[in-house]
Amino acid sequence: MSEVILKITDLNAHYGHIHALRGISLEVKAGQIVTLLGANGAGKSTTMKCISGLLKPTGGKIEFLGESIFGVSPHEIVKKGLIHVPEGRRIFKGMTIQENLELGSFTLKDDAERKRRMEYVYELFPVLGERRHRDSGMLSGGEQQMLAMGRALMVGQKLVLLDEPSMGLAPFLVKNIMKVVKQLNQEGITILLVEQNAKMALEVADYGYVVETGAIVMHDAAQILKSDERIINAYLGE
Amino acid sequence: MSTLDIIFQQLVNGLILGSFYSLVALGYSMVYGIIKLLNFAHGDIYMVGSFVGLILLGLLSPFLGAGWAGILVAMIISMILVGLLGVFIQRIAYVPMLSAPRLSILITALAVSMVLYNFVMSMTSGEYKAFPVDLGYEGLEFGHVFITYTQIILVSSTALLMTVLHFFINKTMLGKAMRAISIDQDACRLMGINVNSIIALTFFVGSALACAAGVMAGVYYGSIHFFMGFLIGLKAFTAAVIGGIGSIPGAVLGGLILGLLESFGTQLPFIGSEWKDVFAFGILILLLLFKPTGLLGKTEIERM
């Protein structure tokens, strides 16, 4: 058994009076791809935001590499080796692709390492390398997603949270993105993936959690979830 | 004097005036760019900078003299001190208001402005203070136009400061983080950027630049006054709007345009120099009517 690198216990979060997370518990083991499935508004993105520190949870425990990161500021969490690629990409439009990647390596002090990682990202996504000095706002949705993921790979992170990487993308692009997710995982990066496209997510994931109205209603190995009738009816729609 | 001489003379005057406007406008624009605050206390930072420069010159001139060496050292030290004052003001007055409605923080800025100029007023009994410099009146003569070395040095120093700022904003990681913060603060947090310290840094840089302008204005005009920040604050705001508020090259361009328009405006028939403020704010009104985003500004998309 590989070690658990992220352990969430009974996580609660509120948006004003709305009780968005009602006791989420989950575990991510090193080297896995774990996916959170669920409908719009179920609490998947909220969970991600609590992990990366963007949203302050109201109760529960979050441990990363055996250390509590509950309520720690996001820029401190990044330094511990966890990065969040948020929903909607959130790239720095108006800045060049290269500048976006450089900002991804903000916590990196070593210039040679920064160059090396940038070449690695350009190798992974050649289209970014070709346009490195262009305004990132000119990129298509798929390319922006690549940039957002590339930005997250600029410091050797242990855990990457990917929130809806396939959102608004054409099917062939979704396939491409998922291929990269798989590749990154094979290179040793652990991934927590939020997806509305449940079929695609279960295809790449090792383990899955199903979130409904702020709570985990089901979890199992991805292979088993894929053939579970309730999942097929609710999320796979076949 | 021929018309050509007048044009050239006004060009020089306009460039000097414009340099001061630009330096102050830069701080206005940078702060607006990152936290959407119209920092109405910024003109008073310029005024305080001028007084800090005056005090330091008084302390340093026994050792360094009242020439450029003393001015340079005094200016650098005052820029650091006033930069820190800017950060201090941001921490105690603006940080607690960041999540409040935008109007509250605007009113806070007005209050900070009043605190600053009332403090200086009470310390100086509201009197004009002579700037203790001795630079002589040598210069270069071009036909009927005379430019003093002081004027040349002031304009070149402004150009130098702007070049350093340009390099800082575009080539260093901290500068890039500043630009990124004006685009998406949460995304910056996720990159490991400590947003609060970058905002503090922006206040430091903006206040230091305003201070430089304040010291230079003291050197140029020879006397300073507690209320000198009010009008230049409004002018710098106008300059920032002309250039497109939030845009750094826009602030420089807006300041220079405003300075030049003001100096040339005084030469128009029936319009004397007493009309130059009317001229400046008239331009502001026209611009707000016809191109509210400014010359280099981008159309802002309201996001949630």
Image (spheres, coloured by chain):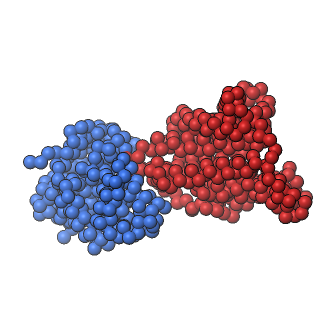
- Residue B216 screen position, x and y as percent: 70, 42
Specify the colour of chain A. Answer: blue
Horizontal arrangement in the rendering, residue B61 relative to residue A42 (left or right): right
Q: Which residue is pictured at 20% across the width and 58% down the height?
A: A187
> Is B180 in front, or is B301?
B180
From what the image shows, is residue A20 above or below residue B290?
above
Relative to the observer, which residue lies in front, B275 or A88?
A: B275
Residue B194's spot in the image, x, y percent? 42, 43
User: Which residue lies at the image location 33% right of the left edge and 65% below the top edge?
Assistant: A122
User: From the image, which quarter does the N terminus of chain B lie in?
Assistant: bottom right
Query: In the figure, residue A88 lies in which quadrant?
Result: bottom left
What x and y, as percent, mark residue B90? 55, 37
Residue A14 visible in this rendered orientation of the protein: no
Q: In this picture, is B250 found above or below A108?
A: below
Which residue is drawn at the image coordinates 24% and 42% (left, top)? A64
The answer to whether residue A223 is left or right of residue A89 is left
Q: Is residue A226 left or right of residue B246?
A: left
> Residue A137 is drawn in which quadrant?
bottom left
Q: In the image, is B87 to the left or to the right of A47?
A: right
Chain with red colouring: B
Residue B66 seen in the figure: yes
Task: Identify which residue is drawn at 20% across, 62% down.
Answer: A182
Task: Give the image location of residue A180, x and y in percent.
Answer: 25, 64
